[in-house]
Amino acid sequence: MATSDILKYCELLSKYSDDIIWVMDKNLKTIYMSQSVEKHSGFTVDEALSLPMDRFYPPESIEVIVGSFEKIKAAKKIRSGSTPQRVELQAYNKDGSIDWIEVQANIIHDEKGEIDCVLGITRKITKRKEAEQNRTDFTRALVHELKSPLTAITASCKLQLEITKDDNIKRLANNIYRGAEQINKRADELLELARGEQRLLMLHIREIDVAQFLKNIADEMSQVFTDRGISFITDLSDSLPAIAIDESRIRQVIQNLLNNALEHTPAGGKVILKAKQVNNDVVFEVKDTGIGISKKRQPEIFDPYILKIAEGEQVKGLGLGLALAKTFVESHGGKIWVESKVNIGSTFSFAIPIHELH
């Protein structure tokens, strides 16, 4: 599609959209801006077309914009068409105030794979970001309130276990200790989820051997499947590449999926742990012959605080496991999904891009 055709398309689209529609050329110079820019930011169309980028964006936002653009420019084997991008940035209004915005951009390439222009839609998300921040602040405060007394409880239980010789007291102290540890674990999950929502999750990336990584997890968990009368099988490709990941977090994802399969597969059933390379991704799968998930519930299964897995069934906990799995996978640039049929079984899959460490 030629730039002139894109401009005509934008003119038509702007009549039906309240969002800001814009086009930049390959040098990041704005060549089109819809009239809605004045309503949302106070800048006129003429100002939006003539003023420099630093009048609209703080330095941090400009760095994100240019960095994303340069990454696309440096990419190899770009086909003709468009490359979608989505980023959240801060932007100036004419009066000097700052709003959060969501930018959805399509970088348009010509037939030779060269960048022709950038077509984008911008909308304000300040209220949403404020709600996210309020939720994160509340979660952090809640975790702090939970962890403070837990320190004293666990320390007291450890001391009691060391000094008492009464088996009944030891059993009770051990029960209290395990319960406190579970609360501590749930608090950590809440904090991790809050960090993920704010994109503050710190990853410790290193290159691993995928096959050995999965064999270790399988060895650790095989006995519990045997105890439940469930067949546990690993099916690993012969030529799995090494990938760079935060090992502890991806381990947590896989263990969570295996534990879910364990809980929802009856004795005599089967659970399969698989991994294979698909294009530039390593795809991990946990397949079970369990109770399955209805189509109605599948779209919300990775949302936090969803306590029902099957219709009418209550699940212990806050429903954070799959939400955390989604957060951890997406923080690696990957994606996670589920395919399931009620009373037949489920397959949870996630893909991690293959990146080289430099």
Image (spheres, rainbow, N blue to C red):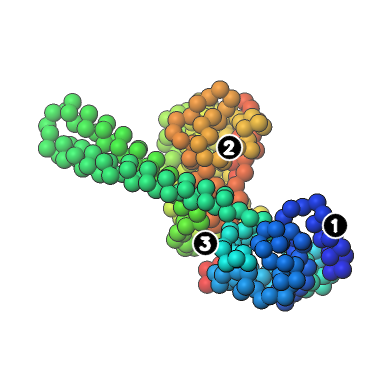
What label does residue 301 carry, if any?
Answer: 2
Residue 202 seen from this side: yes
Residue 321 locus on image (x, y percent): 48, 41
Q: Secondary structure at mark 3?
A: strand
Point 35% across, 38% down: residue? 183
Instruction: Give the residue pinned by disc 3.
Output: 244
Task: Work out which quarter of the rendered image holds the N terminus and state it.
Answer: bottom right
Q: Neighbour class for label 2 at 10 Å: few (<14), some, many (≥20)?
A: some
Residue 113 shows in the view? no
Dot 2 or dot 1: first in sequence order is 1
Secondary structure found at label 1 = helix
Secondary element under disc 2, as helix, strand or loop, is loop
Q: Report the mark closest to the observer, 1 or 3.
A: 1
Identified by mark 2, the residue type is Ile
Quarter assignment of residue 44: bottom right
Q: Is residue 107 left or right of residue 284?
A: right
Q: Amino acid at mark 3?
A: Ala
Q: Quadrant of residue 83?
A: bottom right
C-alpha separation, residue under disc 2 versus residue under disc 3: 27 Å
